[in-house]
Structures are given as C-alpha cells and as structure tokens.
Image: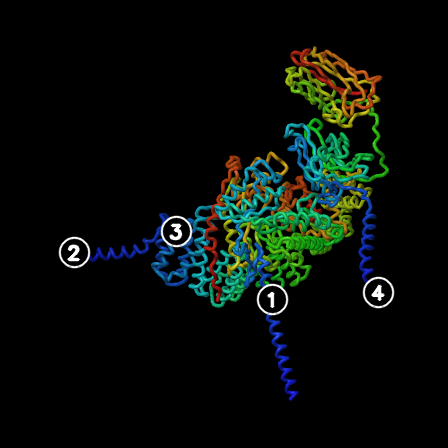
Amino acid sequence: MKNQKSKILTIFLFLLFITIYELRFTNYESFAQDSNKLVALTKQIMEAKTKEELNLAFQDLTGLYFNENKYSEFVEFLNSLVKQKKELEPQVNYYIALSRYQQLKYLEEKQNWDEYFSNGNTYRQEITEQAQKAIGSNPFTDKLHIYARLILWQFHRDQQDVFENQALSDLMNSISEYVKTAQDYQPVKEVAEKLLVYGEKVKSKELYKIYVNKIITSGITDDKLKESALGFYKEGNLELAEALYDVYVDRTVKSIAKEKLIPILMDIAKQFSYKDQGPKDTFYAEKIFKKIEEVGTKDIFDERLLYLRAFNLEKTKDYPAAKDLYSYFVGRYLNSAYIDEANYKIGIISTYILRNINTGKSYFEKLAQKENLSAQVISSLYQLGLLSQWGEDNVKAGEYYNKLLEKAGDGFPETVTLAKERIKEIEQVKPIEYNLKTFLDASLKEEYANFDMTKIDLKSSIYRAKKDQAIDINSLPYIEQSGCLQVELQYLWSGHIGTAKPSLDESAFNTTYIHPGTKEINLIVISASGVVDRNIDLVDVY
Amino acid sequence: MNKIKRYRLQATGYRLQAKKVKSLLLVACGLWLVAFLLGMAQRPKPAVYIQKLKNGHYRLIVDRKPYIVKGVCYNPIPIGQNHEYDWWSDPNKPWIVDGKLMQAMGINTVRFYQPGQNPESVKKVIRDLYELYGIRTIIGHWLGFWEYPCPFYGDKDFQDRIKKEVSDMINTYKDEPGILFWVLGNENNYSCLGMVNPWSNEEIDKEPDPIKRKNMRYNIYYSFINELAKQIHSIDSNHPVALGNGELIGLEIAAKSCPEVDLVACIIYRGKTFGNLFRSLKATFDKPIVLTEFGADSYDAYKDTEDQNMQAFFLESQWRQIYENLANNKEGIGNCLGATIFEWTDEWWKHNENDPESWKVHDTDSNWSNGSYYFDIKAKGNKNMNEEWFGIVAISKEQEFGIDKRIPRKAYYVLREFWKNPTKNLKPKTKKAK
Amino acid sequence: MKKLLMLLTAAVVAITPYVFAQEQATKVAEKPQPKEFGIYKDKNARENHYIPSGWMGDYGDIKLNDQSADNPHSGTTNMQFVYSGKKSQGQGWAGVYWQNPANNWGSKKGGFDLTGMTKLTFWARGAKGGEVIQKFKVGGIKGTYPDSADVEFGPIELTDAWKEYTINLAGKDLSYISGGFCWVTTTDLNPEGATFYLDDIKFAADLTLKPAVKKSEEMPFYVFADSRSINNHYIPSGWMGDYGDIKYDGTSKEDPYLGDTCVKIVYTGQGAQGARWAGIYWQNTANNWGTVDAGFDLSKATKLTFWARGAKGGERIEEFKVGGIMGEYSDSDSASIGPVILNKEWTQYSIDLKGKDMSYVIGGFCWATNVDVNPEGATFYLDEIKFE
C-alpha cells in the first residue's frame, strides 16, 4: 500500500515537474491565434545551440508580431525574454530598435496621432539607445551588428539630422570589416538594396560590387553566374544583374569561342534594351551592343538586332549616335520593313534635334520620291511642305502639300488633316499656327541654339503603340524652385498629337492615334520671362 | 673740483628731467583711463545684437540675455476682407486677443511682412504686444517686389525710391522698445531667376548667356541689399538687419555682395525636416539664420478634410530640428536663432485675391504642390498646399470679443508642450565605429 | 611760387564741379522726348505702365490672364480676358480700367503726363470672332484727382484674327491720365459671354494725326435695331419719375417687328416713387444728363422713326421725344410727338426733324407716360428705332 502510494506520488510529482518545466515557455504574453507557434519559437530561442538557429527563430518571431503590427507587445515580450536569459541581450537590443522603428513608421502611415504624439519621443529615444546597445553588444563579425547600424542610419536619414552622415560612414566601415571574415553576404545585399531605395546610388553600387565579388570568388561556374544574373534581372534587381553580367562577360570573352559568345551577348543586350513593358536599362544595353561589336564586327548585327540597337539609342535620347546607326542601317538593309521609319527618323533627328535642316530635307526628299506609299512617305511630304512654309516659300510648300493630298487619297487621316490646315493658312495668308511656329523657330533658328532640350523632359508611356491604344504623354520641366511662389508655365503642344487637344495649362495629356506611322510630338514651355525650352519625342504606331 | 660739480649738476638735472617725464606719463595715463571709461559709458551695447561664440555658433542677445525666436507670422485679416484691410486700425484690436493666446502658448515674437499704412496704429500694436505680453516684433519691407509690372531692381530711380521708403520705416519705428530686428525682402531672390516677377535692364538683356544674366541680376539685387543694410546701420545701431531669402538660392553671390547684413531670414518649405539647411548655409554664407516662414497647412487635400494632426506632425518635427541647431548644442551646426511659423491665423482671402465673394469662404482648393508634404500629395493634380489653412489657430465666423473667434489647432497645443521642455529629446551622442 | 601753385590748384578744384554740373545739365536737357508710352507689351515688360486693377460692374464675370501664351500678337504673352456674361453682381455689364496706382479711382495722385502723345493703339482679337466690346476708353476717371481727358471708342466687333485699333487722341488734354485704358461690354451684346485677347497696348506720338473732327453721322443711325446689333447707339439709362414702376427688357423675343429681339417695357403705374409718371431717356453716354460732352451730330437726319405696339392695344404714351437734355452740354434742339395710343399690331411712328437743329444730341430717344392715362399700367414694345 505504502509502495503504491509513493509510486503514485512519484509519478504525480514527475508529471507536475514536466508541466512546470513546460510552463516556462507559456508564461510569456501571446495572442490567441499563433500562441502555439509562439511557444514553439520561444522554445527554439531558449534552446538554440547555434547563432543561425537563434537568428532564424528571431526572424520568424519578428514576422509573427509584425504581421499583426503588434510592436509594443513585441517589445514587452523581448524585454521579458531577456529577463529570462541575459545572453539574448544582443539580439533583443536589435529587435527592440527595429520594432520601434517600424512602429513609428506604422503610426505615421495609419495616422495614429494620439500615440504618435504622446509616445513618439520615447520611441525615438529607444531606437537610438537600443540600436547603439546592439552595435556594442554584437561583434562586427555578426550580421546583427550590420543590421543595427543600418537601422540607426535609416532613422537618422529619415530625420535628416546631423548624425546622418556619420551613421552612413559607420555603416560602410562596419561592412568592410564584416566582409573580411564573414561567409554570409546576405546582409551586404540587403544593405545595398536599402541604400538604393534611399537614393544612395554610389554607395549602393559599392556594396553590390562587394556582393558580386563574393559570388565570383566563391568558385561559381560561368553558367551558374549567368543564371544568377538572369535571376536577379527577373527579380527586377538590374544593378546586381548588370554587375554579374559584367563579370560573366569579362570571363567568357577570354574563355568561350566568338561564335558561341555572340548569341549569348545578343540575348543579354535584348534583355536590357528598350521595351515598353518590363525591366530595361538602355545604357547597359548599348554597353553590351558595343561589346558585341568589339568581339565580332558591326556586320554581325542582323537586321532586327541592328534596328533594335538604333531604336534603343533613340530611346536613350542619344540622338547623334542613333542617327549614325540608323544611317548605317539604311545603308545595309535597303529592303528592310523598317527602312522608311529609319530614314524618316534620320530626317527628324537631323532637322529638329541636330538643327541640320539641309541633311534632314535630303532624307525627307528621298522618302518623298518613293512610289510605295507608307505613313513615313506621306509624313515626309508634310515635313517638306512645313519647312518650305516656315522658310516663307509658300509656293513650294503648296506643291508639297498638294502632292501629299494626291498621294494620300483617303488614307493617312492625321497627316492629311495637318496638311489641310497648313494649306488653309497659305490660302488665307495667315502665319503658321502659333504653337507650331514657335516650336519651329526655337528648333531651327541658329539664334535659339540655347534651347537644347535639356530643361524639359518629354516622355510617352508607350513608344510602340497600337492603333487606338491609350497613350500618356508627360512633360517635366527642370526649372529652379520658387518656394511657395507659383511659377506659371504654359505648354504649347503641336505636331502629330493624335486625338487629344491639350490646352495651354496641361503639362500632360492622353491621346490615341487612329493611323499607323511615326508621330512627332512637339512641345514648347513658356514662363513669365519667355520660352523655357523645347522638346520633341517620337512615337511609333503600328 | 669744478668738473665734479658739473657732473653732479648734470646728474641732478637728468634726475630732475626723469622725474618730470615720470609725472607727465602718470598724468597722461590717468587722463587716458578717464577718457576710456567715459567712452565706454557713452557706448552702451545695442539693445539687440548677434553674438558669435568661440565655437563659431551664433546667439541672439536681447537686453543682455540670450533669446530664442519662438514666433509666428502675424496677419489677422478678418473673414470677408483681403490684404488691403487695415487691421492695425481696427477698433476691435485683434492683437489683444491674439497676444494673450500667443503668450499662453509660449510665443515671444511676431513677424510683419511690412508695417501698415498708419504709423501711429502700427506703433500701438507693437507697444501693446510688447508691454502687455512681452512679445517682440520683427518688421520687414517688401522692397517693391509686388509692384507692377515688376520690381525694377536694375533701375537707379526704383532703388532710390525703395531706399527712401526703407529709411522712413526705420526712422519711424526704431525707437519702439518692442522691435527685434528688420527684414529686407521676403523671397525676392526668386525674381533673379526669371520665373517669378522677372525684371531686367538693358545691360542684362544684351547678355546672351542665361546663367550670366542670372548672376548679373543676383549681383545687382544683393548689392542693393548691402546698401540698404549699410543705410539702416547708419540710422539704427540697435537692431540687426536680416536678408529675406527664399531657400538658400543665390546666397553664394550674397556672400560676396552682401556682407553687411547681420543674419538671413529664410523661407523654407521642405516638409518634415529642413534637410541639410543649416550645414549648407554655414558653408555658403556664414551668417546666423532665423526661419521667418515655414510650417504646414492643416487641410488634407487628398481626403478633402481638415487634418490638424498632419500639421502638428510637421511642425513638431520642424521645431525639433530648429532646437538641434541652436547655439551650444554640440551635435548641431549652432547657427539657428529660432523661427517664426507661417502663420498665426488662417487668411480666407488668399486662394482667390480677385473675388471678394470668396474672401467670405474658407476655400479648400489648392494652387500649389509640394511633395515634401506627402500625406496628401495624391490630391488631384498633386495640388496639396492649401493656402487658406496654414494657421495654427483657426478662425470662425462666430464672433467673440468683437472679432472672428479664435480656435487653436492641435499644433498650438503640441508646440506649447514642446516648448515647455524642448531639449528633452535632443539626440545623445552616437558611438563611432571602431 | 608756392603761393601761385596753391592758388592755381584751388582754382582747378573749384571750377571742376561747376563744369561737370553744366555738362550734366546739358545732358539732362538733351534727353529726347519719348515717342511711345507702353501699357502692355509682354508680361513683366519694362515698358508696361498702368495696372488692370479697376474691375467694374459684374466683376465676378471677369477672369484675366495677363501672361497667356495663346497665340500672342508679339513677344511670348498677351492679355486674355474671359467675360462669362453671367451677371454675378446683377449688373449686366462689366469692364476693366488700367489705373495708376492700382485701384486709384481718382483719390490718389497717380496720373501720367502724356502730353505729346496723339494716339493709343492696341491689337485685339476674339477667341472665336464676333465678340463685341461696347467701348474702349482713355482717361475718364473722376474724383479728387480727375483725368484731364475722357475719350471713348467703339463699339467694336472683334474677329478671330489680330487687328490693330487706334484711338485718336490728337488735340486732347493728356496732361493727367491715371486711367490709361479701359474696356467695357455688356451681356446684351455678348449673351454667351466673350473671350478676347489684347496685346501691344501703347500710347504713341504720331505727329501726322489730326484731331478728330466731329463728323456728322451717316443715316440711318440706329438707336435700336436688335439687342446684339453693333449698330445700336444710345443707352436706355435715363429712368425718370417712378423708375420703380418700370421693367425694361432689351432682349424680348416676343414677336419682334424685325430681327430676333425688340424692346419690351412694362409700366406698372403704381407710383413707386410717388411721382405718378415715368419715362426712359436713351442717352449717350449712360446717365449723361448734360454733364459729359458726348452728343452725336445727327444733322443729316430728317426724321426719327420707330415701330411700337401695345400688349393689349390702347396703351397711351404721352410723349415720344428726341433731344431736350439740358445741362453743361445741352442738346441742340428737341422734337416730340404725342400723346400716342398704341395698337396691338406693330405701327410705325415718325418724329419730324426737318427744321430742327440736330447737330448735338445726347438724348437720342425718350418716352414718357403717367398713371392717370394708364390706370392699369402699360406694357408696350418698341423696335427699329432709328434716325433717317
């Protein structure tokens, strides 16, 4: 009897012991839904044997609380954790700083002003104190040290206070120390991304280089390198993709045969060259095109690729280079489907951008003589008429316009409408429509050479549009600021602007085109003291 | 025997001479000391002056004590009136009501862009604010910026006329004990860029390079300010002279053309913080700064509703940065002397100056855009700055004490608390990286 | 020798400023007279003077953009006025005065001395064409500091192309002009409102210009043809007697005799002002009871004819009159018919002017009646009022 009683007592005490032992983990504040997960994570943290386990557990824990925006609860929980196990202090320091940082952002976003005003100062203080503690308690070989410095810099950067610069250079220095010994380069990448978001392009590039070097020196194969780069490209991280591609190209230029390499380079170039949708970097695309030319010759470019390269240069707004390449194109591929478009663009670029009327006219003449009609042939006749009319040779202008009407017949409605307007002006002895005339003067007269298109940006949302597709045309003048004094700007639109009729005060408009062709959109921006600048953009409608 | 006598006599003579010289020197020293002390007594320190500290920081000293400008731009135009209304002569004396509210908040300074037409009324306002509430006054002059068709800064006749107006103003008000300092112009420097109120002269027109034209205008304008400042200093040695400037634009020229000014009075609308304003100013034109126009509006143009919290948020953040950069804060630049918020009360005429009917209405439309005030930047056309909603005190058609009832906004209370303990939350030192 | 040197030096020093002063004086004396005095060349142009600050009448109907880049005549900007014609202040007309200083209605000294200028020229166009400006003016500000001249010009019907207009100022006293320029128009003339542009407004000294000789008006000379007619003259502004009893509609579409509109007058006969009679004078300029020198020379007219009808028939108008205004500037003569019993149908009436001196007529037309002969009041219509 006695033995049984003591057996039962022993079992009961044992069970009690187990329960109390387990209770350690359930003593912490938790919320209803994920309490099980919380308990599990807490256990993981308490029992973690390696730094990696610890970090993973903390990350998951953070996610748990942040998803519910329970920042204050998380801070309380962290404080209670550290009471249980003092060794967790370095981690807790960092995560408290992170929580308060996120919390302030959240309060601002949700405009939770009561809490913001009453606790804002306290939270700000906690961010700096805890971040600094974390910096002190985490060795520079630990990624939390980096993350703590990152939070501190972000905080000062948001406040734009006097500590910002020091915090940034501290961050950069600690990364250079970190990479001397660390294996995990993920923090470097994360910091680089953050720097890019904040506009610190140069520093971001530096870090991406470090990251990329790590990848390279890790013994990665050429193929894996290319795969990595493509992966980053697809993610939209063009900086990293380009950095990796650069390394890849440098390697493979020496190791792979020309015939094999060139198609690969062409692929890369296509990835980055101009397209309406999707990631692009026209400067990088041209860089790769140049490499292809170096490795092979210019002749390597087939019709499509050559045209793509020229189009890419045009969209980069490197007009002299674009013109040269289009000229080369028309010399090589006389029967291309793009021939009219290319000739026309040379004409427009020469005339209106490079101020070389005679060259421009020669290209328009070339097109105007063609028997096979295309939108660019008709547009060339229009341009020739317009330039004559502007040059006050109304007889010649009339001839061109009439030839245009004759050839166009019922087609090419947009250009025909414009031609008819010009003819009316000649017949009624009126000047060219004011907006158009101002654009022509600013673009063609030598004395206005200072209107070099640098003070206004002109963009279209789509450059290869379909008929009837909605297009947004946007302008952005770069003028000096004027505080709260309103600078009244007026926008003189002209050219082939589709169905829209934008008024003087519209800096942007949307339009559609009812007929294919290469459409030029002209803009003059006027301020209180006269013309600010001019710009022209080209949209191709198919 | 005679030789010795002679030598002795000579020696005595020399000794006597020496004695004479000594006494003369003593008398001279005594006289000089008296003159020096008298001179000191006759040259008291100016009532208001700027002190440059050993560490290069600046402080405003008023009546021998350091002074931080905690101010507001003050223009109490009643509902239904426009800027031409002579509130200074209003028998209901809005400044009596406002002064009390300002004092309770902790405001010690008001700013007037230009004094009213009636000097006696203006003096009464300055005196009342100072004697009743201890509030001092900053007075400015537009320098003809808004004249039609443009301010002819390039013409001597125009400059002479403005010089006379300014000297008349100084002579009229300089002996008022409540005066703090003078401000020349507001954002007039923008007119040198050619976008707002542009002006020119024949010489400038002949110059083909637009950048050179701009610099010519800057030189003319800032040299003119320098002359005005000199003129004021010669009339009134008791108050500093400030250069009113939009942002820091043009100050690299002012540094050479305009050394006579004592401080700059800047108009800054950069949202939550002033960025690197103080550091930039120190590097460009090392003078102290008072931000004489800054703040935030209290209308959310995107949600189309009043939002006092949004205004309080921006103002509190801005004041924290102001305090960080006052003198003797080691972590700041130390060239800030304080600021005057734009503005005390809403002005209901501002949205459409030409339509008297609209002056009776609290218009919520906006004419300008500023992305730094990001909460409502998604408003239509990005026009999010609501000109009639910048007051930290709202006004109501309901009358109280004979004027539009004053209703302090959230920012009033938030700043009142902030000023009670402003240094509580200046940043501790950061640990440098090893 | 020393003394001589000192004397010479002193003499040189003494004489130099005097010589320079003389040179300056000559320089000043030689400053040439300006040939032009600008009002508006381009936004912010140095040559601009006067400020378009004096908004009158239905000022809420007016919008001004003084730096419109919409097809300016010269330079990069012009002035765009948008007149909505909505009668925001209930007046039915609006205008803008260019003043110096701004908002000076004659209480401040701000007039320029434009002696030597002989004309004001300006370029104008309408957004669509067909916009009518009732008049353009130079001077005309009254008050403590009145303008020395008051010259009117118009009405003008604008085209959609730029046209230059000239106001002849030769022989006028331009010694003090604070109201440099002005335009006025009405909703009657622009029922849909009007958007128009002005550019290159300036005074000029054209010595070939002779003072405008008051010419005898050509016949027919309309008082009223149609509400929108540019040929209308005189303004039905002189309301007399029980003016509260009168309702005037200058755009009535109720069976006009000719064209789209006629004049409709409702006389209630209630004795609002206690006079028990009422009438309206058509005057030039508005409300001119002989105080403004604005009479037309109608010497070529032999008669005034008009068409009238009563709403019911039987309405009695005591008098229809021409001329008769007495004042500093009196009408040269007067002529009348009446009493007239109106018919329900349109009937033409004629006031014989043969033998009358019609060389100066401010009061172009007038009707008057009373409650005794119209106990129920009278509603009647007028159309095609003209001198011929």
Query: In the rendered view, would you say A145 is above or below C104?
Result: below
Pick whichever, A387 or C100, lies toward us: C100
- Amino acid type, callout 4: Leu
Q: Which residue is mark 2?
A: A5
Q: Which residue is mark 4?
A: C4
- Amino acid type, callout 1: Leu
Question: For the residues carrying marks 3 and 1, which lies nearer the camera in this image?
Answer: 1
Quarter the C terminus of chain C occupies: top right
Outermost residue toward the right in this view: C208
Pick whichever, A108 or B60, lies toward us: B60
Badge 4: how crowded within 10 Å, few (<14), some, or many (20+)?
few
Q: Is residue B1 left or right of residue A213?
A: right
The Cα atoms of the two marked residues, 4 and 1, are separated by 44 Å
Check the residue under mark 4 and report the chain it is in.
C
Name the residue rendered at 74%, 53% in the picture.
Answer: B208
Check the residue under mark 3 and report the chain it is in.
A
Does mark 4 fall on the same chain as mark 2? no
